[in-house]
Image (spheres, helix red, strand yellow):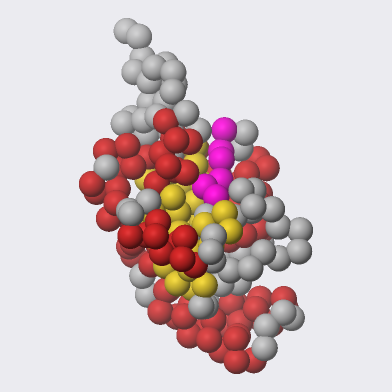
Amino acid sequence: MPASAPSPVLFLISAPSGAGKTTLCQNLLQTCPNLRRAITCTTRARRDGERDGVDYYFLDPSVFRERVEAGWFLEHATVYGHRYGTLRTEVLEKLEAGFDVLINVDVQGAASLRAAAREHPVLRQALVTVFLTPPTMAVLERRLRHRASDSEAVIARRLAVARQEAERWRDFDYLLLSGTPEEDTRQALMILQAEQLRTHRSVPPVL
């Protein structure tokens, strides 16, 4: 990273399933040329159109377990029966190259990353956490039903998990109450731009 450049931001977004974080992350990546996505590892099967090393790093469960035991991950969790994790090198190499890094994890993963940041000066300086959620569970339920991709049992399970996750909103730096995709993107950009101007990240003026 050039000495004259401000230090980058590790922009973490967490949200309940159906809250709109995938759309928000896509919009941010399209809007911010210096923002790069941290690609997550997963043990789930590849879906149609997904590419290894682009959408996810698809790992055999035994390989995933070996990398957990070797300490390769900043965070890892089991979500709906599949394992997900963020490689330490995936984040640090992008930050050290001067890119802002976008990471999309659940509440459990966010807690693990906060713990890792307390022990690592680069992560500690870079990390900014945002919790995105609809203003009420009723709004979230409408969104989940509008997707028309889940059974009643899955919707009930996702809502139960969402209630538990929403109770952790105070653990984050920012709370973003979701509206339209455009409103969510505008507010997230305001947060990111304000954090980029924080004095501990800025290049000192020449006086």
Q: Is residue 109 left or right of residue 137?
A: left
- What's the residue at 52%, 55% (across, down)? 40
Q: In this view, does 69 lie to the left or right of 17?
A: left
Q: Residue furthest left?
A: 119
Does residue 201 sit above or below 207 in this rendering? below
- What's the residue at 57%, 64% (across, down)? 178
Q: In this view, does 38 lie to the left or right of 18?
A: left
Region rendered in magenta: 34-39
Does residue 11 sit above or below 47 in this rendering? above
**Looking at the rendering, which quadrant does residue 140 occupy?**
bottom right
Residue 37 image point, x, y percent: 56, 46
- What's the residue at 64%, 52% (across, down)? 52
Q: Nearer the viewer, residue 173 or 49?
A: 49
Does residue 105 sit above or below 2 in this rendering? below
Q: Which of 205 and 35 is in front in this view?
A: 35
Residue 35 part of the magenta-drawn span: yes
Residue 65 image point, x, y percent: 41, 64
Residue 21 image point, x, y percent: 58, 61
Residue 70 part of the magenta-drawn span: no
Does residue 83 sit above or below 24 in this rendering? below
- What's the residue at 42%, 30% (across, down)? 96
**Looking at the rendering, which quadrant does residue 203 occupy?**
top left
Residue 122 image point, x, y percent: 32, 37
Residue 37 visible in this rendered orientation of the protein:
yes
Q: How many marks?
A: 0
Q: Nearer the viewer, residue 152 or 65?
A: 65
Residue 179 visible in this rendered orientation of the protein:
no
Considering the image in quadrants, where does the C terminus appear? top left
Q: Residue furthest top?
A: 207
Considering the image in quadrants, where does the N terminus appear? top left
